[in-house]
Amino acid sequence: MLNTFKRMYKLTKGNRHLYGIAIVCTFIAVLIALVPPLVISFTLDNAILGYEPLTFVHRFFYNFIGAEFVRNNLWVPFILIVFLSILRSLAGYTNNRLQAATSENIIKDMRNKIYNHLQKLPYSYHVKAQTGELIQRATSDVENIRAFMAGQINEMIRTFLLAVIALIILFNLHVTLALVSTIVLPVMFIASYIFNKKMKAAFLKQDEKEGELFETIQENLTGVRVVRAFGRSSYEIEKFSKKNDEFRDLVANLFKVRAIYWMASDFAGFSQIAAILTLGSIFALNGELTIGTLIIFMLYGNNLVWPIRNMGRILADMGRMGVSFDRIDEILNEPIEEDEPNAKTPSLNENIVFENVTFAYEDEKKVLQNLNFEIKKGETIAILGATGSGKSTIMHLLLRLYDINIGNIKIGNVPIKEISKKHLREKIGLVLQEPFLYSRTINENLKMAKTEVLEAEILKAAKIAKVHEVIESFENKYETMLGERGVTLSGGQRQRVAIARTIIKNSEILIFDDSLSAVDTETDSQIRAELKERAAYITTIIISQRITTLKEADKIFVMEKGRIADIGTHEELIHKDGLYKKIWNIQSMLEEEMEDEKLVPFEKVGKETDGRDIKNASFNEMLDPSTEFDNETAGRDTKK
């Protein structure tokens, strides 16, 4: 609990003066709330029945207003109570406004802090993190803290002040009855503590399950095309329903624990009021207590029991806030990406050299093993390899999404670890196989790469990417609003928009990570021709499994199991026995089969070739060295 208070105190930095004024207003409201019972008691005991004043408040009224005056003007207590009620309302209003404004300021800063921190976390964190879980922490958990800061802190202060001042007055009036008035309070404090412990554990489970629910919804909405394509709607509904049932059961358990506490505290509270009334009546009949004083005990007793009973809920909410703090701190305590001291920002239009580079993702097996190669500035190189051969990992290392374990990468003569990550990512253009487009207009998506961009630059980039005519065919042209993740466009259209966005960036290094896979071969060829004409001074890296996309590169790297199996131009590689030649033969034959319907059915050709169905073979199977396939069986000349 002390740790929670420390966290709250840190959050109030910059707003403590407002919180101070709010606490003063609470103090004023509590003092005013305690006066009306004393006014009633004075009117009854001193003004009407003529008893001597008992408390300092009674004496104040007696000396400055006078019992005789009140007896002759009974409307005065009424006006005084109404006036005090107005003052109390104004103090409460001011307090609530200040608490709300302060809590909103605090939570706004907290949301910004979480969002900014997420932006600075390394790529490796986001790969493992669940998006729905992060969203839930940045929304529901933040809201739990806001709700407590806005209302419950004020309630805690009010309860404490009310209890302390009321007890001082009650013990001043009648010690025995005051003891009776407080006999249940320790029991309620202990019950509140136990209730808080149980609720805190339950809140943690609820938050975790709510995070899973968020993740299920997020995954379903993100993968809606896959769900529809595979007819998995029923499965997804059942999956969500199961998670929802589990969440409902946890919430029901929370209400069960809460109901038990309220029932027990209600019984204790009413029992205490009954005890005050019974014993107070006996004392009054014996002349030890006046009727006015008994009224004070009854009203103060009520003011003591219910706020302290409410402490259970306050402590439970504090426990919930503590859980939310812990879950948010898990994000904020994650180390952010940081550059080396005095990180450099050199030109990237230089040779790229890999020297004995070995890399593994955390504790996994090595993905890259002892890579040594050089890419000269302005060169277009291509990378071919099976899934898992390490193609995309090279791109990750160049962008410093991960740092190398062993070896060195240099751009020019500068080790990549000495280059600012921000600088690298600004100067390296990347187009992914599954490009991400925002739910905004096409124009806004294109401008994300470079905010200050001329309209002519946008049109030129769109034409190079062969997407200008497509955009012009839309009713709203470049102002066409895209669906989430660009879902309103086809796969090829999304890729071409992403290519145009990267071209606008004017990068010094361009990386195409299988980003032409959804484009037909003719458009693919046109885009590459445009890029080649434009990018003589730009180093270009093309990762693809389509040889027609790679063959015009200055140099082609064939990767196998984290190593470079072969290097050469297209003409050199198709004349060497190896994986590249094998894939070239297979892909060329597939193209010929599709163009010439008079050829033998492909199923037959494939099975006659080596006893296996090549048409249905995966790319990884094509790269399998055990697969026998050569020029003669392909029925064509590789020089063609």
Image (tube, rainbow, N blue to C red):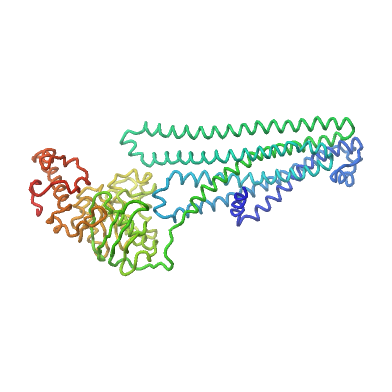
Which residue is at 57% across, 42% downward? Answer: 320
- Horizontally, is 185 left or right of 240 in the view? right
- Which residue of the protein is positioned furthest toward the bottom in this rendering? 413
Residue 185 location, quadrant = top right
Q: How many dots with numbers?
A: 0
Q: Tell me if residue 295 comes above or below residue 545 in the rendering.
A: above
In the rendered image, residue 160, in percent from the top left (x then y), is placed at 71, 45
Which residue is at 88% across, 30% downward? Answer: 285
In the rendered image, residue 494, in percent from the top left (x then y), is placed at 31, 48
Residue 256 location, quadrant = top right
Q: In terms of depth relative to the viewer, which is nearer, 234 or 184?
A: 184
Q: In terms of depth relative to the viewer, which is nearer, 92 or 351?
A: 351
In the rendered image, residue 639, in percent from the top left (x then y), is placed at 9, 54
Q: Tell me if residue 349 comes above or below residue 41 in the rendering.
A: below
- Horizontally, is 459 left or right of 310 in the view? left
Residue 339 location, quadrant = bottom left
- Horizontally, is 178 left or right of 490 in the view? right
Q: In terms of depth relative to the viewer, which is nearer, 606 or 17?
A: 606
In the rendered image, residue 415, in percent from the top left (x then y), is placed at 34, 66
Which residue is at 36% across, 41% downward? Answer: 223
